[in-house]
Amino acid sequence: MSATAVVTADPTLSSASLSPSRLRELDLKAVRYEIIGVRGAPVVAVLGGISASRHVASSPSDPSPGWWEDVVGPGRPIDTRHFRVLGIDYVSNESSTSSVTTIDQAEVLAAALDQAGIRSVHAVVGASYGGMVALAFGLKFGARTRRLIVISAAHESDPIATALRHLQRRVVALGSAVGRERDGLAIARGIAMTSYLTSRHFEDRIELCDRHDSRLVEDRIGDYLKTRGEQFADKWTSERYNALSLSLDLHQIRPEDVTVPTTVIAITGDRLVPVAQSRELARRLGGPSQLIELDSSLGHDAFLGDSASIAPFIDELLRLGVETLS
């Protein structure tokens, strides 16, 4: 893979472009990554869901909040005083007939590491889609990481999750067909939110409502879903959404082929990644494995909204072996 770096005013913040044969088929002309933290420190690659970006957390060069601000930064569980943190933008295939896969995203991560001059990382921490990509990276580039931390992700898509995403893509297609792409995206995202969260979360939202006032109950939940959907639709195209949604469904690896030490963190109320699937993954992995099961009313989205439950385990796992790194 060849790459050309473009370095910003902050020497720790970079973007790279590359043109391996596989990525020539994809829509993006540049693979972009961002690195924050202390130079010379062990590197941790951090990957989130399909809506995540390379901007994981705020830094002096970009003080805007990142998508994992509660977990990454000075004094936080992934402490940028002790680790360098690398994030990437996922590629999609908006102008190609081929589907983008989690293996493609693992190739992107490897290319970003190449451009940054990083031979290997201390860990890859991936949540949701990012956990799938982490497993793909462990499969294809196992020698380049000491550890995987896989949160709310498994070796393949659960059939119910695939069914839901299929319907979401149909909603997006219908919206685009009638000239209402934004509405289609917003509704699809709203449907997705019902699978990210638990029944308990929605119960909490209407706890103080008069249950006899059905309109109030509907508005309390409906307004939340509408707002979250519209926020998403403002930033996305239907092509990118469909590409990454399908990539989730196409994901499939053989756990026995992943020999990197891996910790699987599962949420018992996760509707998209049932805890039984996480148990199967941990049991079948080809290397040392550990399963941590947690409970959270945020379900699949616990990694975003319930960092107090998940982050201490990440902190402890990242400390393992760090004293032996040069």
Image (cartoon, rainbow, N blue to C red):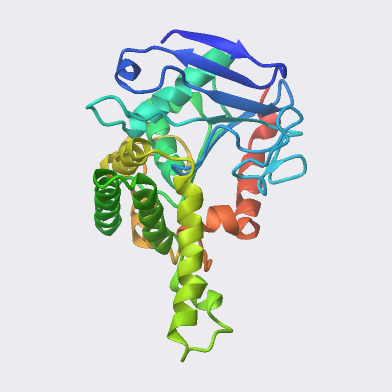
Residue 261 appears in the figure: yes
Q: Quadrant of residue 259?
A: top left
Q: For residue 274, what is the image quadrant?
A: bottom left
Residue 264 visible (yes or no): no
- Taking the image as shown, residue 270 lies to the left or right of residue 307, namely left
Up the image or down, 288 lies above or below 36; here it is: below
Nearer the observer, 248 or 314: 248
Quadrant where the image shows the N terminus: top left
Q: Is residue 195 above or below residue 186?
A: below
Q: Is residue 16 above or below residue 259?
A: above
Q: Nearer the viewer, residue 2 or 145?
A: 2
Residue 31 place in picture, x, y as percent = 47, 21
Q: Quadrant of the C terminus?
A: top right
> Residue shown at 69%/38% (left/top)?
64
Q: Position of residue 275 (x, y in %)?
A: 39, 61
All told, the count of numbered labels is 0
Q: Nearer the viewer, residue 229 or 247?
A: 229
Residue farthest to the front, as pictured: 179
Tell me what residue is drawn at x 41 percent, y 59 percent. 190
Relative to 275, is 324 on the left or the right?
right
In front of the other: 85 or 92: 92
Residue 25 in the image, given as x and y percentages of width and height = 29, 19
